[in-house]
Image (tube, rainbow, N blue to C red):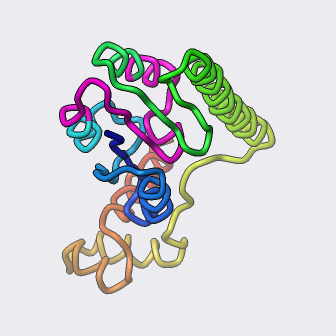
Amino acid sequence: MRIGYARVSTPDQSLAIHLEALQQSGCPKIFQEVASGAQAERQALSAALDYMRPGDTLVVWRLDRLGRSLGQLIVLMQTLHNQQIGFQSIVEAIDTTTATGQFFFQITGAFAELERNLMRERTLAGLASARRRGRKGGRRNTIDSKTFAMALQLYEARTSSVQHICARLGIARRTFYRDLAAHRTRQQG
């Protein structure tokens, strides 16, 4: 029996393409979930593996739906192999029920991991370059200096609660406290 597994990382992503491809490839049962590929424990994938029997084939739309690292994929493939369960990826045309398919899976997984590592290296290099040019990463302050000055004045007067001050000025309490701590640090230094 062909069992489908469909996963997206965030709720705003759609499973429609995955489900359509899995149905067209002959999967009568499809397990689906919204979960990051980085998570080791994915409930729908575990349920699919528990449901499957020797001779079944796990089918996914794309290889990256199973995991984000080559290590994760290899462990899963070994688990499937030990349970005598095949694997098929529709987009990459991988079918581990054949020797060629097993080889191709390992090569494709290695390239996918290489691509992720190169992206990470480029991102880190870009951040380092920006830092050398004096740019600082992270969120910008959301309170402009005039608004913070008013909030600080009201806070120091102790006539209103922080919650009331923030609501009145349209700022978040957390942001006010963060900027207040930064302000105190600047005064001490």
Q: Position of residue 170 (x, y in %)?
A: 38, 82
Q: Residue 100, position in %: x, y?
A: 62, 19
Which residue occupies 63% across, 30% down?
112
Could you tell me residue 130's position as x and y percent?
A: 75, 42
Left or right of 107: which side holds 48?
A: left
Which residue does the image show at 50% across and 68% down from the upper left?
Answer: 142
Q: Between residues 166 and 45, which one lies in front from this camera angle? A: 45
Tell me what residue is drawn at x 29 percent, y 82 percent.
167
Please tell me which residue lies in front, 166 or 160. 166
Residue 20 belongs to magenta span: no
- Tell which residue pokes out farthest to the bottom in this image: 168
Magenta highlight on residue 75: yes
Q: Nearer the viewer, residue 145 or 188?
A: 145
Q: Determine whether 39 is above or below 76 in the image.
A: below
Picture coordinates of residue 76, whole percent (x, y): 38, 23
Q: Quadrant of the N terminus?
A: top left
Q: Which residues are magenta?
A: 49-76
Q: Is residue 140 above or below residue 75?
A: below
Classify residue 77 as left or right of residue 28. right
Q: Residue 32: tell me if it is visible.
A: no
Q: Is residue 43 above or below residue 106?
A: below
Residue at point 74% right, 32% down? 125
Give the side of residue 109 with respect to residue 16, left or right: right
